[in-house]
Amino acid sequence: MVKILSIFMSILTFTLCTAASFIGSSGGSSATSKITNNADSEANAQIIFDSGSGYGWKFWGNATDGSVMKAIPDQDTIFKNVAAKSIIWKTSSGTTYLSANDSGVITANISGTASDLSATLGTGKGGTEMTTAPDDAAIVGNGTVWQAKTLPSCSNTTTSKLLYNTSSNSFSCGTDQSSGGAATPKCGLIDCTAPVLSDFTNMNIGTSTLEDTSYSGSLYIETDVNAGVQGGEITTSASFTATLYMQMWLTTTYNNCGIGVRGTSDSHLSVFDVVSYDSGTTHLKVDHLPSFTTYSSSPFDAGVPYATNGGLFMRIQDNGTNHIFSYSVDGIKYHTVLTESRTAYIAAPNRVFWFCNSANATHKAAGRLLHWVLN
């Protein structure tokens, strides 16, 4: 650091001894030493910091001949360096903690206490122009300055998400997130479309129930024993495509689960299901039922065991003319097993449903619906 005393000695024409005589004199002392910078009043006074006393001193006098008229202590310890055109702030011990030159460059020693220096820096100087730190706020640039934008409380762990609007530079909450932003579960090779319990009306439900379980994105049913077809149904138009992906627990003979279509005028049902048999095998079938508890015929029976591990996609399509029954193991490629007239067994089909059925007096059937799409 340039020694301040030597700077002042090069600027001023008086010596340190002369300055000391000013300091020691009373009232309006004068001297023959010249002063510079036309210091003809206190407002224009030359100010020098005396390292011995720890104070600054103001000198001003006659603007015509430059004689010193008065010298008084300046306990603000502010020194104007005429040669360097700078302002320097010093501590009482003589340490510079802030200086500013006429180019606007500020040099600070911030090793002292917080009270030594307080300043707000603009964006152009690398600052934020902020003097406070608002709670729950983020600093956002608008292309000109930095701004503190409040962050909303999006704290619903199931549906909340944080949104940002680039036009208004503001944050808000969204409420359409699934499972707190977790990855969508897979059914086969596709994303599961979770069934919604409120979409379904109970069908032939006795003491059993359709359950919206704690397993997110699925519905569950465990049938009553020997109760027939039980499940949830939706009213349909003349044309639809209904697809499900279902896991099934078929514990004994004549337990079955699947998808079906029925009419309310004649109570007939056509069901596309997986059925367990005495031999311990399971068959993929299309069955005709005159009621929830009575079997009539099977227009399609795969005739080979079908493994239920993992689950199966099952689909019924009503194209206005026919019912088309198909299945898929991956959700992408479907295989049609039967096409029949939509009125071949049902006079006026107007319901589509998912179900499980127990035709056994001892054992129940159960199924978990993981995917349901009705178009």
Image (cartoon, helix red, strand yellow):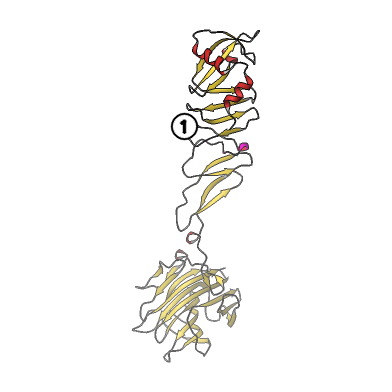
Question: What span is in magenta?
Answer: 124-130
Image point (56%, 40%), residue name: 147
Q: Pick the residue in front: 170 or 316.
A: 170
Q: Pick the residue in front: 104 or 53.
A: 53
Vertical side of 23 occupied by 303: above or below:
below
Q: Quadrant of the N terminus?
A: top right
* Corner quadrant of residue 344: bottom right
The residue beneath circle 1 is 115
Q: Position of residue 150 (x, y in %)?
A: 50, 43
Vertical side of 352 occupied by 6: above or below:
above
Q: Quadrant of the C terminus?
A: bottom right
- Does the segment drawn in magenta span residue 138? no
Q: Where is residue 107 in the image (x, y as percent from the top left)?
A: 58, 33
Q: Within 10 angstroms of label 1, few (less than 14), some, or many (20 or more) residues?
A: few
Per the picture, the main secondary structure of the magenta-coloured stretch is: loop
Image point (52%, 16%), residue name: 20
